[in-house]
Amino acid sequence: MFFKSKPYEFIPASFSYQKGVARVNPGRGFYHLFPFVLGDAVDYSYLETTLLSAPSLYLIEISLQNYPREKLPPEALNSLREIFSFFKEKGGMMILRCCYDLTGEAALKEPSYLELIFEHMEQVAFVVNEYKDYILLHQGIFIGNWGEMHGSRFLRGGQISRLYRKLRECLAPEIRIALRRYSFVKEVENSPELSVYNDGIFGSKTDMASFTEQTMELEISAMQRELPYGIFGGEVLYPQEEKDILLWETMSRKEVSQYIFSHLKELRISYLNEEYDTKQLALWDTLPPAEGFFSGDISPEPYANLRQQLEDFLGYQLMIKGASIGKDREGTCLSLVLSNPGFGVLPFSVEIGCTLLRKGDALPDENLPHEVLADGVSANGVSANVFLSESIGAESLPSDGELNVCVLPLIYKKEKTRYLPDISGTYEVILFIRRVDNKQLLKLSNGGLTERAPGRYCIGTFKVK
């Protein structure tokens, strides 16, 4: 496109899908479980060894079973802080689950009265909130076998609602809460960011009673409608009942793949246990990838199996589908179409940074891409100021959603300002997407883009005559 005032031309890059890229982004994918009993010694050398092969998403299960009749002592809270600090330093994000039982005996190990649980919630949340930028969500409300909200004496007479309200009051608003079943959601306040953790996926027709058989489809539809910004996940099981096993065995391998992919997609699954259960996960390694859910050119390379495909589509993905010059009431702007082909929503708000650099110039220090660019200039003195978009959250980019966003206002009529340079030459349009909270750069699921530095992409060029 050319502008009347000066001959500018924008040439967009080629935008295509590339598999495997999204797996490094935080807050999605397979997780590794790390259980701790607060008050017991922690073997950090063992943890270091385990983390060598673990993904960058951790489920931190904290059992308070050593304190069923007393407040948490200072040394327990210090230990909790050390655990969170350890995983923060390792990168990635944490899923939390606080409970009183890790062996299926919650009724014997939980406190005798709610007030002590409330006090424990206050104490734990005081530490947890210090790490809110590194916590994806909290599973459960401190009760039940393994923290899964069953086998507890606190499941009736409005107790679930009281426990939820107390935990919601204690935790920072940035930390979402997930309940074990959708039916529990109906017992508490209906927040669009409430989530469900389903630890029985595929175990039975109802996901091991995660849903009611007669109304399962209605419940899933209600979850999609009433919890649009929730983050859903859990564990998968191999069918537990003979009739369900027989049903799977009568299906073709292609049909099984389609069913697995479809069910995880309709549940909007963002995270799964990488180890449980092994029989179901091993099956995915042998099944062909699902077909027909996306256009034929979304992946130029075929997936080797279903598991490899699901590793990409769990949670969110960020993919640019196009970029162009457009005009609105404010002026002329470079806009792009940002899509999310993944199963889940964005778990945090993001912003897009965009700048123009003379083609061939070296970027400033890649370890400080946004700070240096925001204040610095390129090697030949051309301004390298970064324009930051407005914050983009889960409500703007749901699963399968698309968003048109201005990434570089070229000419503002009202302010009579322009981001286009007056010096002739060819300029690269450099773009990054980062989290708003901790400024972490995210990867795009795009092939064909030149990555000038980690997380910074050339999405096209401007030619200034």
Image: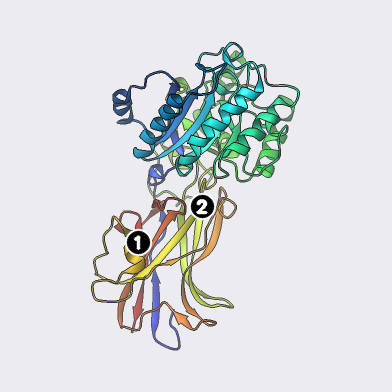
Question: Hey, what amino acid is under mark 2?
Answer: Ser
Residue 296 in percent (x, y) is at 47, 50
> Is 409 situated left or right of 262 in this image?
left
Image quarter for residue 88?
top left
Residue 305, given in percent of the width and then of the height, sits at 41, 34
Q: Which mark is residue 349?
A: 2
- The residue under label 1 is 371
Q: Nearer the viewer, mark 1 or mark 2?
A: 1
Kindly indicate the quadrant of the structure image that contains residue 112.
Answer: top right
Q: Tag 1's secondary structure?
A: helix
Q: In terms of image quadrants, where is residue 3?
A: bottom left
Query: Where does the C terminus fall, quadrant-wise?
Result: bottom left
Image point 34% across, 68% down: which residue? 375
Please tell me which residue lies in front, 180 or 70. Answer: 70
Identify whether 456 is placed above or below 335. Answer: above
SS for callout 2 = loop
Question: Gap between marks 1 and 2, in whole Å?
Answer: 19 Å
Foreground residue among 441 and 439 = 439
On-image quarter of the N terminus: bottom left
In this view of the protein, can residue 283 be seen by the observer?
no
Image spot of residue 355 (x, y percent):
38, 68
User: How far from the left and from the top, in percent, is residue 401?
Assistant: 56, 53
- In the image, residue 416 sits, relative to residue 170, either above or below, namely below
| Dot 1 amino acid type | Glu
